[in-house]
Image (cartoon, rainbow, N blue to C red):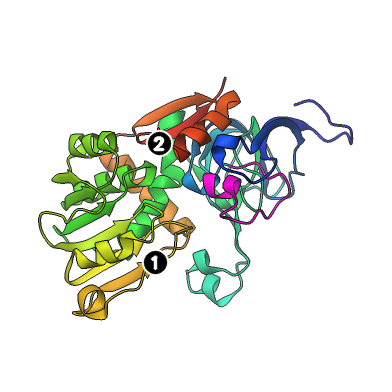
Amino acid sequence: MPNGADDRPTTPAWVVDRTAPAAERPLRYVERPLEPLGPTGILVGVRACGVCRTDLHLAEGDLAPRVPRCTPGHEIVGRVLSTGPGAEGFAPGDRVGAAWLAGTCGTCRYCRAGRENLCPYSRYTGWDVHGGYARHAVVDARYAYHLPEGPPDEELAPLLCAGIIGYRALERAALPPGGRLGVYGFGASAHLTAQLALARGATVHVMTRAEEARRLALDLGAASATGAYDAPPEPLDAAILFAPVGDLVPVALAALDRGGTLAVAGIHLTDVPPLNYQRHLFQERALRSVTANTRADGRAYLAEAAQHRPVVHVQRYPLSRADDALADLAADRVTGVAVLVED
């Protein structure tokens, strides 16, 4: 870590230089000053970072930037290099993960009720604070996760957002034991969530536009895999919409059985067309959104994933090609999950 002009340590990192379509390469690779460590901070040497659709939304302007020239990335796996004096529970050399939720106030009524994902003052990795498209990252230890030794870095990274958000979406979808789950879209989060549902004994039907993704779904154990707008072969007890396509909301609602629930998992969704009450919502069909996650969600998912050991379908990119990874994600050239690894 060389020193910058202001004597702060720096790190090679990608930043959102401007918002533009990913094909126009809105990211720029720079030498960026590191943030101060702070009392509860840990300095992490980044070994891998997943490439999430939220990063794409940030780069393309669907999410308004909150930090000038922000470094994206919130599926970080690395090793602790140093710690602040109040960074309890971590020591240099520990394997650590950082996820989407980077901080909360801890005092509002949502935090006090165990619903910190709804904290009005919540902060997010790769949006409010610099993320993992870098050699080094500063992480608040209170929002970091201990990771087990053994699994490769690039297979653990997607669990830290794609897995955790999928876990919360599955909980919000209220799938009954042994129920029938519909999954709309089959990218990073969906292919992990489908495996979680299968491990719990569900029947999973996948609706997605990409033929390669449909093949992957069947290989992982889905009962069927069809086009995104196709009706599943049987009524669904629950569904999760992962594709950021509002047009699919009425399609998924119409596929639900009586009393079924649709959970929308993304942070961004195109406009939802008008719904017909009788067809889409009557007979106690429910529509729910999913907002971020709590740290309890993260711990619960990582523990469950350690038991069922999901197959993580990874496309690896060296850190120096992060802009290629984002462009490939935007163009649907990624099957499973793209992960940045050390050059």
The span shown in magenta is: 56-72
Quadrant of the drawing holding the C terminus? top right
The answer to whether the residue labelled 2 contacts the one labelled 1, judged by CB atoms less than 8 Å apart, is no
Residue 337: numbered disc: 2
The answer to which image quadrant residue 296 occupies is: bottom left
Disc 1 marks which residue? 272
Q: CA distance from mark 2 to mark 1?
A: 26 Å
Relative height, residue 342 to residue 246 (above, below) = above
Residue 302: numbered disc: none
Q: Is residue 264 left or right of residue 88?
A: left
> Is residue 285 shown in magenta?
no
Amino acid residing under circle 1: Val
Residue in view at x 47 percent, y 32 percent = 339
Q: Residues within 10 Å of mark 2 (few under 14, many from 20)?
A: many
Q: Percent position (x, y) of residue 171?
A: 32, 61
Q: Please identify the residue farthest to the left as the structure is shown.
A: 234
User: Front-most of 115 and 132?
Assistant: 132
Q: How many marks?
A: 2
